[in-house]
Image: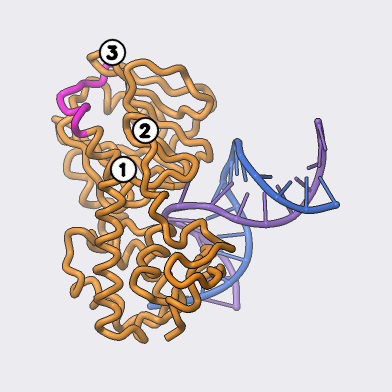
Chain colours: A orange, B blue, C purple
Amino acid sequence: MPELPEVEVIARGLHGTLVGRSIQSVEVPGLTRLSEPADTLVPRIMGCTVKRVYRRAKVLLIEMDDGLSVVFHLKMTGRVVHAVKRTANKHDRIMFNLDDGSQLIFSDMRKFGYIRSFAPGELDTWDFLQRVGPEPLETGAAELADLVRDRKSVIKGLLLNQSVVAGVGNIYADESLFRAGVHPETRGNRLSRARALKLFTELQSVLGQAIAENGSSIRDYVNADGDAGSFQNSFNVYGRKGQQCLTCKTMLKTSKVAGRTSVFCPKCQPKQ
DNA sequence: CCAAGCACCTGACGGC
DNA sequence: TGCCGTCAGGTGCTTG
């Protein structure tokens, strides 16, 4: 579900409210499955005080005072919400009770998401962090363009590949391809230099706008306060299958590219 | 190195 | 109403 902008909005919200809070107790509802067994996670985290909340790729990270890191991947339907008081939800997987009476809750309908902890110094050895590509908002567009120029794979697949560039998912891949006028099946090495530069410039712009608008909410996403985002109102192609292109009125096309449903305008995004 | 298919889950929606 | 197939902001594994 959440891509870079949504996780970024959650991280910023939580950083503002969680820093300095300590974990008094942890609840793990009955049949919950965690990626890390509760009996190793819970003792580790008990009594820890939050030092920083941040994001890398689509991963949410909480750094504790003693150097412990707790990471969440929300996958398709995960939520991390900070609430003063909230009635239990059937999809709640773990609740942290904080020293000011508030709760941090991780819930996930489809159970694809995970939570893991890393002892001080251990985080850097996590294979995900070793593999993941650069942050698109902290890297120059020209440098990003260099990452795909010699690649034979379709550009949509390269955008979605976390080891090429971090944090891009189906929505922002399709939206940036539309804005740059690039067909999703174009091979990386068939993109002109100028077009590749345009693509990554548009990617940065679309990600920045989405963050500014609190992310995109299709069905599940809410930020750390439980509020929906509004960038879905700015979609040009994502979810607009069967509708007209907002630029040229051509009927938008849809096909599976790199295993994911892709929506694009055949006229504005010609094959190259 | 790359692509395709499947797996992990639950729920919403459309068609009959 | 209800049953069935299809689809969903992601990623990892296996196979070819």
Q: Judge if badges 1 and 3 mark residues of a common chain.
A: yes
Answer above or below: position of A87 versus A195: above
Disc nearer the start of the sequence (2/1): 1
Q: 10 Å neighbourhood of mark 1: few (<14), some, or many (≥20)?
A: many
Amino acid identity at mark 2: Asp
Q: Of circles 3 and 2, which is in front?
A: 2
Q: 10 Å neighbourhood of mark 2: few (<14), some, or many (≥20)?
A: few
Residue at 34% from the left image edge and 39% from the top image edge: A116
Q: 10 Å neighbourhood of mark 3: few (<14), some, or many (≥20)?
A: few
Residue at 39% from the left image edge and 63% from the top image edge: A175
Asked whether, in this view, residue A196 is left or right of residue C3, the answer is: left
Q: Judge if badges 2 and 1 mark residues of a common chain.
A: yes
Secondary element type, mark 3: loop
Classify residue A182 by image quadrant: bottom left
Q: Measured from the top left, where is residue A64 in percent x and y? A: 18, 32
Closest to the observer, A87 or A232: A232
Which quadrant: the C terminus of chain A?
bottom left
In the rendered image, which residue does mark 1 sit on?
A214
Residue at 23% from the left image edge and 71% from the top image edge: A144
Q: Measured from the top left, where is residue A194 in percent x and y? A: 25, 82
Amino acid identity at mark 3: Gly
In the rendered image, which residue does mark 2 sit on?
A227
Which chain letter matches label 3? A
Cα gap from disc 2 to disc 1, whole angstroms: 9 Å
Cα gap from disc 3 to disc 2, whole angstroms: 21 Å
Amino acid identity at mark 1: Asn
Secondary element type, mark 2: loop
In the rendered image, which residue does mark 3 sit on?
A101
| Membership of A217 in magenta stretch | no
The region drawn magenta spans A15-24
